[in-house]
Image: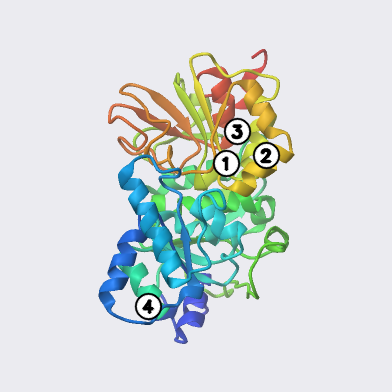
Amino acid sequence: MGKTIAEKILSDKSGTDAKAGRIVVANIDYVMVNDVTGPIAFREYGKLGTAEMHKDRMVLIPDHYVPNKDIASAEQAKEMRDFAKKHGIENYYEVGKGGVCHQVMVEEGFAAPGRLIVGADSHTCTYGGINAFSTGIGSTEAAAAFATGKLWFKVPETIKVELTGSFGKDVGGKDLIIRIITDIGVDGANYKAFEFHGPGIANISVSDRLAVSNMAIEAGGKAGIFPFDDLTREYIKDTVRGAYTPVSADADAEYCRVLRYDLSEIESMVAFPHLPSNGRAVKDADVRIDQAYLGSCTNGRIEDMRIAAAIVKGRHVDPDVRFLVVPASQKVYRQMLDEGLMQIFLDAGAFISGPTCGACLGGYMGILAAGEKAVSSTNRNFIGRMGDKASEVYLAGPQVVAASAIAGRIVTPDLLEGC
């Protein structure tokens, strides 16, 4: 019996025959921590009492409370900064030089096809969009990876997702993953990997693939992996660090489940509170909003900004709506400046921030008051995720977020005629 992509990568990195259900100890290509999870990992590493440190595999990215919101977050950031200086860790991305961790991991070339990457953040599964096996871990596990360069894994079973067709107008990767999670539930892929197949793959941009992989965890998934193709090669050609080896599944690989979707039949979707699995077609939504948020590790890339800017250009944000635009990295921020997207958003009445996770996790900006509703391009809409427990978050793609900011209610761009 052949192997899935997950089984092949874990076999390669462990030097064993890694089949679903087996336990392996595998070599890590990179381990990433942020300003929230990093300090815990640093302290745990200190308890190990070892001089061993695989610093070339460590990536430290402050992003959750950037810039620091209070003394406590400033202390966390200082602990990360001091740790990087003490140990001479080169892959440290200070405020103003990086951005949201998962965007930085991709655009700085750490993530690449065939690599095994772990991060002390649940959305580390993002890098499966470019054919890596990447997954979230705890801070204690990160400390072990600092010291040994290895971690143990239970090899996951894999769900095969067969895709045909092409997306319709104003539909993209966010709509696909909301549809999948709605179909199988937030526990439908517990400790399983998603593996995407079929001719429809060629019609999905790498940016959209990253968004889909990012939300694999919202169905309980261990990873969400796309195959390598010409789009992948083109996307990473100017940024990837070192050599990489693309991985494809064997024709006779064994899957625990098969899902099939015709992309042309995927509608613009919105996930209602309070779960990503509460997906509905946007056409069936009738929700007034107080805030629209465009950004995050899910949809804060330059492609998302271009999509949204094209929709709001020449229009004005509804007077009762706050439209927050947050690029996922300094590089995206600069691209927005160079391409004139900043001016478009400013003219429309949007608020633009530097790269940060702040609003996505309800950390310190864009906080919702009781009773307020937001449509957001982020990945989670749990109770109290972005503010008061009595607020509501609706998840959607950049097309719907931008259109909704203009309309003042959740809509698709085609309903903006006359706005």
Tag 4: amino acid: Ala
The secondary structure type at the circle numbered 2 is helix
**Badge 4: residue crowd in 10 Å (few <14, some 14–19, many ≥20):** some
Q: Earlier in the sequence, mark 2 or mark 4?
A: 4
First-in-chain label (4 vs 1) = 4
**Vertically, is 361 above or below 256?**
above
Upstream in the sequence, badge 1 or badge 3? 1
Circle nearer the viewer, 2 or 3: 2
Residue 296's disc is none
User: Closer to us: mark 1 or mark 3?
Assistant: 1
**Residue type of the residue flagged with mark 1:** Pro
Please tell me the numbered disc located at residue 336: 2
According to the picture, the residue beneath numbered tag 3 turns out to be 399
Q: Earlier in the sequence, mark 2 or mark 3?
A: 2
Q: Nearer the viewer, residue 298 or 149?
A: 149
> Where residue 327 is drawn, which disc sits there?
1
Provide residue 268's location: percent of width, then percent of height.
56, 34
Cα distance in 3D space between marks 1 and 3? 15 Å
Q: Residue at x 54, y 72 (%)?
A: 115
Residue 169 appears in which quarter of the rendering? top right
> Can residue 349 be seen in the rendering of this structure?
yes
Amino acid marked by disc 2: Met
Disc 2 and disc 1: Cα gap in Å? Answer: 8 Å
Q: Earlier in the sequence, mark 4 or mark 3?
A: 4
